[in-house]
Image: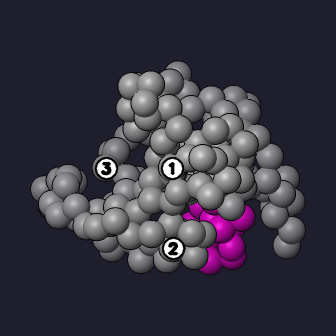
Amino acid sequence: METVVRRLLKSDWDSVSEIYKEGITTKMATFETEVPNWQQWNAKYISVCRFVALIKEEIVGFAVLSPVSKRNVYKGVAEVSVYVSNEFRGKYIGETLLKTLIEESEAHGFWTLQASIFSENIASINLHLKCGFRAVGVRERIGKLYGKWYDNHFLERRSNKIN
């Protein structure tokens, strides 16, 4: 199965929102408990560096960046989000998306990418490490979801192309 990656379009929202909903259901992908509408989601993420992965024209994953701060000094720092449909996990789609996101982020001047990943989400932590992220530390009891405290692994990747 060939994976095709292309820019995320507004018309992809129905598929993207379903994959995001699957992530919410796992209780180890996001602290969000409801899928936002397109306008809310669109406002949260950086307009460049938004991608979907397709297999046989079906959207099976997406990757996006969100700003870590509105301050100008952090304009080249962004947080990574990668989601893959339950049915297609373990098929290197996340890796394909993350590698595309890294390459395009550097082309758009991002020098640091960071990820905050639930400690239970070993597959995602390993994916990021494989793609050049390094573990910075563990943020203990950083958030509570459905009455349970969660730790997050904090990872970052520094570009060696942007000085």
Is the N terminus in the top left, top right, bottom left or bottom right quadrant?
bottom right
Element marked by disc 1:
strand
Residue 85 can be seen in this image: no
Disc nearest the viewer among 3 and 1: 1
Identify the main secondary structure in magenta: helix
* Corner quadrant of residue 7: top right
Residue 77 picture location, percent across and down: 48, 42
Residue 104 picture location, percent across and down: 71, 46
Residue 80 picture location, percent across and down: 51, 50
Q: CA distance from mark 3 to mark 1?
A: 23 Å
Q: CA distance from mark 2 to mark 1?
A: 14 Å
* Residue bearing mark 1: 112
Density class for disc 3 (Cα within 10 Å; few <14, some 14-19, many ≥20) is some
Q: Earlier in the sequence, mark 3 or mark 1?
A: 3
55 sits left or right of 136 in the view: right
Query: What coloring was used for the rendering?
Result: one colour
Point out the residue furthest to the front here: 163
Q: Which residues are magenta?
A: 84-98
Task: Please count the marks in the image.
Answer: 3
Q: Are marks 3 and 2 in contact (CB under 8 Å)?
A: no
Residue at screen point 55% across, 27% down:
42
Please tell me which residue lies in front, 84 or 67: 67
* Residue bearing mark 3: 31
Element marked by disc 2:
helix
Density class for disc 1 (Cα within 10 Å; few <14, some 14-19, many ≥20) is many
Q: Which mark is residue 12?
A: none
Disc nearest the viewer among 3 and 2: 2
* Residue bearing mark 2: 129
Q: Are marks 2 and 1 in contact (CB under 8 Å)?
A: no
Q: Amino acid at mark 2?
A: Leu
Q: Is residue 127 above or below residue 54?
A: below
Residue at screen point 57% across, 76% down:
130
